[in-house]
Amino acid sequence: MTPHRRPRELWSAFRNSPFLPATVLVFIVAIGAGTFAGSYTYAMANPTPHQIPLAVVGSTGPVQRAAFVAGMESALRTALELRDFPTFEAAVEAVEEQQVFGVIQVEGRRARLNVAGAAGASVAELLKEAGPQVGARMGVPVTVRDLKPLQRGDPRGLALFYISLAAVIIGFLGASQLTVHAAGLRPWERIGFTLVYALLGGFAIAAVVDWLLGALSLPFVESWLILVLTMFTSGMVFTMFNTLIGRWALVPTWGVMVLIGNPSSGGAVSWPLLPSPFGAIGRWLPPGASVNAQHTAVYFGGHQHPLPFLVLATWAVVSCAVFLTWPNLASLRSGP
């Protein structure tokens, strides 16, 4: 007859068995499924405009222009962030610099709404819909023109989001597989192999999307290097968390890179339409930085900004530094 075991003994046996991590994993997966669906639904299900930056040019009096702008704000249910420019050319340059999402011209009894689909497809669609409606109510003919249309192979503007998403996810999955199958690598060897698979993986993504499928015409070298930096950064973020908390590293990596980073990246829904918290933090996380850099490379060549590269590089450098130094710091704290 098996002797009766005390609760403490039962807990000790359970804690040292594979059933404890399996049980924890069951709850993590369930919670992860709910938060994954919730974060994407929160960000994308009902895009709402928040302070859309628009350029304004025109020689008409302030009353006529103010009436048209007020009508646009009423139709969009948001305040527009208006920036006056002396000439249409100066306003277009602001579009190229991605400072504004379009240009409003009101002259006499006519208005022209110049949108930029490549600056944000979801914002452009809202403006295209609102402009003619406002003009019809005011009796002002409104002409809509797209200054920066999307490429024909990507009519919804989602391809760049998907290739960045692929680089992010494959980046940290590759690092997790190095942890499982190549645990004997020394730290610099681990970083080196992460860079190698980032180089090859980034090339594969760009080649398939551009050369094989023809969905996008990429500035190949620049897009490839952005994907490399994205994959390497994502892999090193996982490696950092693995150094800090061990086998549960996928949980914070998934949270930062997928649950928060991808919905807030501005790739599927433009930043002015995201909920305010996502719109504020998205560009400071690796997925948002990757989408931003890729977006500028493809559609606004010659106007690339340093910020997304600085964001990616900072995450990569900090992650590498933690990976290289944390074990030594931990051994010093524990003492001889």
Image (cartoon, helix red, strand yellow):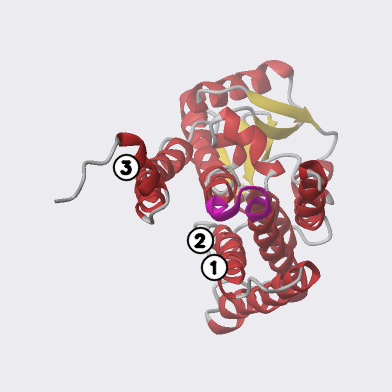
Q: Residue 2's spot in the image, x, y percent?
A: 18, 50
Residue at position x 51%, y 21% in the image: 74
Residue 132 among magenta residues = no
Determine the residue located farthest toward the bottom in the rendered image: 212
Q: Amino acid at mark 1?
A: Arg
Residue 128 can be seen, yes or no = yes
Looking at the rendered image, the disc whose residue lies closer to the viewer, 3 or 1, is 3
Q: Residue 270's spot in the image, x, y percent?
A: 58, 43
What is the C-alpha distance between the residues marked 3 and 1? 64 Å
Residue located beneath label 2 in the image? 155
Instruction: Judge from the rendering whether residue 221 lies leftward or rightward of residue 208; answer left or right.
Output: right
On the image, which quarter does residue 80 sit in? Answer: top right
Q: Which of the labelled discs sits on residue 152, or is there none?
A: 1
Residue stretch in magenta: 241-250
Residue 247 among magenta residues = yes
Indicate which disc, 3 or 2, sits on the residue closer to the N terminus.
Answer: 3
| Element class at badge 2 | loop
Q: Which of the labelled discs sits on residue 10, or is there none?
A: 3
